């Protein structure tokens, strides 16, 4: 079976010292590089926001980073400004092996966030990744990267919903863990049939 490794958002802003640093975020780089040769396709996502993106707390009066607000498409956590288009923090970690097949950018439309590699946060606007994978006959996906409880989990849940065989390798993931979000994400992934392997870092 053709199998793909999907590397989610291994960018400097999600690593220690970055704008939305995930504890131990840089520790995923070495295991991800080591996994790449085992896959027929290696795809990467890159969180890529305009400077006035609506997921940034800075764009909302009376709101602070990590507050949750209601948007037209549902609940949305407000984040510190991060992964701004062309900024240093939006770059991939310099040690990440970039010899992959596809880089998919997401979150570039001001009014809607996109955690998942498959759909924007309205859960219905496609990114085109499903079509790409179908075209290549890829049905078997392993997801790794940052952050376990947001972009990795949303991508894994969408992939399971679309009928892919989905594995998340926790050895090569790290979480933000906002108010129990990691426990919730793990429970949702387990009940959706996502295979969780490896140990939490
Ligand atoms: C992410 C929050 C905001 C992620 C991206 O990559 O998990 N989280 N943007
Ligand atoms: Zn983002």
Image (cartoon, rainbow, N blue to C red):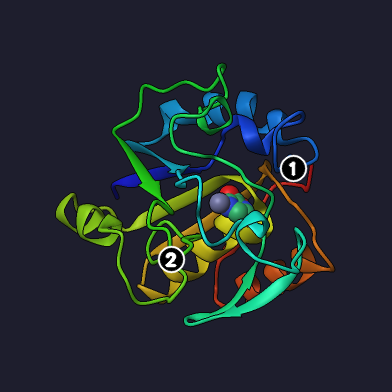
Which corner quadrant of the image does residue 165 belong to? Answer: bottom left
Compared across the picture, whether 92 is left or right of 66 comes to left
Position in image of residue 95 (x %, y %):
57, 17
Which quarter of the figure is the C terminus placed in?
A: top right
Dot 2 falls on a residue whose secondary structure is loop
Distance CA(mark 1)–CA(mark 2): 24 Å
Position in image of residue 73 (x %, y %):
47, 81
Position in image of residue 197 (x %, y %):
65, 52
User: Which disc is residue 175 wearing?
Assistant: none
Q: Nearer the viewer, residue 114 or 98?
A: 114
Q: Nearer the viewer, residue 104 or 100?
A: 104
Asked whether mark 1 lies closer than 8 Å to ligand 1, one says yes
Which corner quadrant of the image does residue 83 belong to? Answer: top right
- Is residue 11 visible in the rendered image? The answer is yes
User: Which disc is residue 22 wearing?
Assistant: 1
Dot 1 falls on a residue whose secondary structure is loop
- Is residue 40 visible in the rendered image? The answer is no
Q: Residue furthest left?
A: 135
Q: Nearer the viewer, residue 94 or 64?
A: 64
- What residue is pinned by disc 2? 111
Graded by Cα atoms within 10 Å as few (under 14), some (14 to 19) or many (20 or more), the crowding at tag 2 reads few
Q: Residue furthest top?
A: 95
In the image, is residue 24 above or below residue 72? Answer: above
Compared across the picture, whether 154 is left or right of 19 comes to left
């Amino acid at each position: 079976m053709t199998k793909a490794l999907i590397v989610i958002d291994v960018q400097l802003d999600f690593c220690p010292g970055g704008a939305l640093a995930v504890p131990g975020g840089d520790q995923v780089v070495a295991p991800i590089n080591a996994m790449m040769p085992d896959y027929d396709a290696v795809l990467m996502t890159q969180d890529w926001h305009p400077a006035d993106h609506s997921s940034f707390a800075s764009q909302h009066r009376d709101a602070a980073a990590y507050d949750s607000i209601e948007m037209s498409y549902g609940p949305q956590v407000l984040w510190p400004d991060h992964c701004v288009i062309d900024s240093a923090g939006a770059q991939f970690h310099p040690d990440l092996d970039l010899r992959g097949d596809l880089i998919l950018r997401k979150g570039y439309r001001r009014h809607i966030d996109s955690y998942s590699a498959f759909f924007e946060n309205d859960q219905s606007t496609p990114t085109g990744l499903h079509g790409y994978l179908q075209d290549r006959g890829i049905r078997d996906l392993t997801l790794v990267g940052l952050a376990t409880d947001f972009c990795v989990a949303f991508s894994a849940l969408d992939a399971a919903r679309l009928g892919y065989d989905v594995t998340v390798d926790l050895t090569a993931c790290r979480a933000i863990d906002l108010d129990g979000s990691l426990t919730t994400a793990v429970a949702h992934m387990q009940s959706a049939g996502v295979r969780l392997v490896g140990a939490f870092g």
